[in-house]
Image (spheres, rainbow, N blue to C red):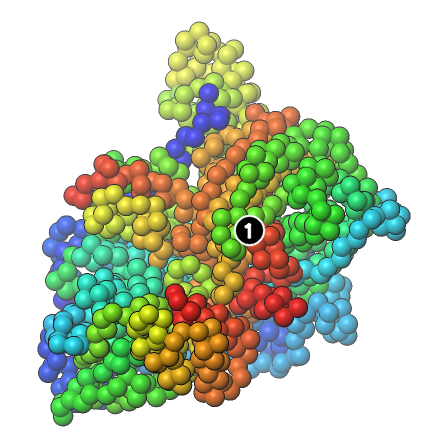
Amino acid sequence: MKNVTFTLNGKVVTSAVEDHELLLDALRERFALKSVKEACSIGECGACTVLIDDEPHYSCLTLATKVEGHDVKTLEYLGDIDRLHPLQESFIRHGAVQCGYCTPGMLLVAYSLLCKNRNPTEDQIREALSGNLCRCTGYIQIVEAIKDAAPVFQSEG
Amino acid sequence: MFVGRSLEKVDAAAKVAGRAAFAYDLKMEEMLFACIFRSERPHARIGQIDTREAISLPGVVSILSAKDIPGKNLFGAIRKDQPFLADRAVRYRGEPILVVVARNEEVARRACGLIKVSYEEIPPILSPADAASSAFLLHQDGNLLSYRRVRKGDVAKGFSEADVIVEHTYSTHWIDHAFLETEAGIGYLDERGRVAIESSTQNVHYKRAEAARLLGIPEERVRVIQATTGGGFGGKLDVTVEGFLALAVHHLRRPVLMRYTREESFLANTKRHPLHIEYKTGARKDGTLTAVKVNVIGDTGAYASYGETVCLRTAVHATGPYEVPHVYADSRMFYTNNPPSGAMRGFGIPQLAFAHEAQLDEIASSLSLDPLDIRMKNCLKKGSLTATSQALSASAGLLETLKQIEPFWRLRQKKHPGSGFGLGCMYYGIGNTAMPNPAGAQAELAEHGRIILHTGACDIGQGSDTALLQILFDALGMEPRHVILDRGDTASSQDAGSTSASRQTYISGRAVYEAGRKMRQFLEQQGYPEGKDLREIYRVAKGQQPLCFDGFFDPPTTRLDKETGRGIPYATYGFATHMTEVQVEEATGTCRVKKVRASHDVGKGINPALIQGQIHGGISMGIGFALLEEFIPGETASFDSYHLPTSMDMPRIEVMLVEDLEPTGPYGAKGVGEPALIPQAASIVNAIRDAVQVNVYELPCDVERLKILLERKEKR
Amino acid sequence: MLPRFSSLKAKTKKEAVTALAEGEEVTLVAGGTDLLVRMKRGESHHHLIDITSIEELQGVVAEGSRIRIGAATTHSRVSTDPLIRESARSLGEAASGIGSPQIRNMGTIGGNLANASPCAESIAPLLVHDALLTIESAEGERVEALAQFITAPYRTTLTGREMLSLIRIERLEGYREGYRRVAKRAAWAVSRLGIAWAIKEAEDRFLDVRLAVGSCTPRPFRPRSAEALLNGRRREKWLVEEAVKLCLEEIRQISGERPSFIYKLPVIRDLLRTILGGG
């Protein structure tokens, strides 16, 4: 076991983790962050996406020990039911959520994109999302939601 | 009015906040984990099973086999021919043999890996042709699961009247549902000692019935609750984890969690039937269709699942959405030792549409007719007779969808070399075929003046929760704030049937409407329109009269004649036209879908945003089906070799709706879940033909197959 | 879920190569996108050394006529680096299409090379730029050409005590350069075919033609005979056809006749015609 200290959703935390433990499991089990989903476990679907230093990574292929000293964000960072982030509200407004399983990953990628690019084109949004699979929506309303949220985006969650 | 508005989904806030608990997110005290030991052989007698090493692994609690099943060890959506746990023989690679229960997932799976089974291999039957000729019977009644036929008029006469005849064979491969959330569930004993199962599912009452049969106990002693479900598409209609959970809870009296890995889902889950379609079409030189002869052969795999449904639907829909006077359609599904094929969005019709639309374009081409014109000429309308001789009396808006597409079609322009445009039309019977498939719903006036909608209709992401509530709001003439949804719990909801066959808006919607109208009547009697408060009405009426109002709807259908298929298989149909623009790069065989215009007759759009979402998703699935997806038994393990469309594979999409009201539907609504997908692959194939003059007869037409077709064309 | 193993994060190159020398069966891990998948599928590794915190293994720096790329530089970084955009465009383009955005944030150029998949997309552009690899161990360092480094699919000359630390490529100025992949879908797919090119020409005359073909033969390669035919000659349709033929011949010589060639060779033929024929 090793201790890892890192910033998680805005707060500095420390946890003991196993050497072989995946970030996905550490976040879900040790920090009860159930928004991080597992859907394929080999980095081929994007459902497990988290932000490390505001960049999207697959937590199913990241060792928990890797985040020592880094900044990690999950969907819980963005907002909660009673105080939704404009991005989350935009997803609701645009019908961008069907079954909801890909939604956490999509929102985090959207957040990361808008942090870097305040006015992305549709093509840029599609490219940013190209590492996250969705079987329900065909991506269209997700792209629309992100485009619509861009003007009101602020990166402090 | 709420019907017709794009109301925000009632479950969206929890999902965007990451709060929606899917089955694998659930946790209970003393919870165990179960996983399945599966057959490594496609066809074998089970010899010795050695679990000694596994059972002695620290943390392993129990290993259950067929012998531990107190009730019946057979289930099936239609025909009960599938064991929960294989007993003496296995019929497909991945068939469940044992349930391993341990203190956590790591131990359970490790224990699974320590189990040793000896098999006596039997030569596997791997194709319908083999199945038809083999002396080995996979099931008691033989290797032919189902044979259905539709006969209308006299095809010989029809072909003799034809000026042009086109005949080809089309084939498709296995497709996986690939829902993002794999199969998962939790089982436990509830406060009443019932075996309770909360799972990712498309139905609850059916699962309860199967679990009760498995345990040999009355249905009232079992409870099934739909957990937030991450996609279904037909793959969560059959029993998946529910039986195993029920068995484990029954024996161990503790909560048990299960989930499939992605590899397990690919291995264990039913698939879209690969179909072999022999299609012959005859037409007069003015483009009028005279005759259609179709022979469909399907590989239904090791067990029946929904094979009979696919068999019947393909026979019934054989002509496509056109009026054809002479029809001769046969459909056969064969058992093999391949993975079981079952329900998947469209039940065989996406495959069939690929064939009938390609046929029609070839006919049009040989007669120098425009593909839109030939469709307008032959399309089903009010008053048309379908292939089963049903006269369409209402809500048959295919022509309107063609007319909506028409201005764009007439003005189409190929901007680059490799540009092409294609049309795909479809019709699809809403609800189960030629059989009762009712839904019940209940509106209850409860304490504090709350109104509870009890419905067993499972929302799998398509938005039935929201659509049904909208229907109720309008039926009651009331604001949303009074209404609570109680959904998908056999303890308190009516049986609404499965979320499949695009039926919930139409059938549950109608049941909800009926319940709502009854409650409305009651409320009017109690003085609600005059300003009487709901809380007050409840207080006064409580104990004096029933406060639960039941709605019920079963679409009026008839059985079909066994010999001819004549009858009324569905009370209503969805109709649609898709126009697709592709860009083919001849150098590489790459086909990009650039734009799709989709026009759908939905009867009445309860919630346009939800409908758009279904159509976008259906188009995405259609692109996968046409160009990318192919499950190869024994080879395809996960998403690294099974390609779903990404955001960059998607075209720009315009959705147009036609509202040709369905008199029996709630506010005129029908269904759209499967229609959304059905014409898409067909329109891509026709667009490829337009772009590069290549005929596609096999799907997926991926980058390699298309290049090979292009090379062959060059050589000729 | 991964099987148990012990891991350590190396902070310096010395730490990494010492651990390699002293340990039994030590495995280096950078992005982990290949290794962790293999481990989930049963490959056994007991001691992992994470090298992504080693500063000297990161970054893109100009060094005279060459560019130095740290082996643990991510594909994201390679694809957006201005130096690479300017003087090694085919590498930037190849890197920008590897996997998905997340994979590019995690995966490294060194990992791509050390894994040595026939479909590894960094390889073709690196061959075009005559990449030289620096390989370090407790005993010292050695330099090897990329073409020699990869010996077979998934095999390199790396011993269990060695670490790839640096990739040095030639800067190419005044070349028409690019990378073209062919894959099953528009994003995030293993490349079925990849061609990198850097062509220097003046007034319709080929001065220096560099081509590399990936995902076709067991190792990506440069069709030297085709290049040699074109260098110094005027661009003419028949000459380009000859060069294309030579390239296809070389592929057949390397691999024999493979089932996939019924598709791949015509694609290479058609793409090369476009690339050589004037872009």
Which residue corresponds to mark 1?
Answer: B420
Task: Specify whether B46 is left or right of C42.
Answer: right
Q: Name the foreground residue: A110 vs B553.
A: A110
- Asked if residue B420 is positioned above or below residue C66 in the image, the reply reads above
Q: In the image, what residue type sits under mark 1?
A: Gly
| Circle 1 crowding by C-alpha within 10 Å: few under 14, some 14–19, many from 20 | many
Q: Name the foreground residue: C217 vs B325.
A: C217
Figure quadrant of the C terminus of chain B? bottom right
- Asked if residue A139 is positioned above or below residue A15 in the image, the reply reads above
Q: Which residue is drawn at 13% across and 86% down?
A: C18
The answer to whether one can see residue C267 in this image is yes
Q: Residue at x 28, y 48 (%)?
A: A110
Q: In which quarter of the image is residue B434?
A: top right
Task: Specify whether A68 is left or right of B705.
Answer: left
- Asked if residue C97 is positioned above or below residue B548 in the image, the reply reads below
Chain of the residue that carries numbered disc 1 in the rendered image: B
The answer to whether one can see residue C163 in this image is no
Residue B190 on image: x %, y %: 42, 47
Q: Name the foreground residue: C75 vs A17.
A: C75
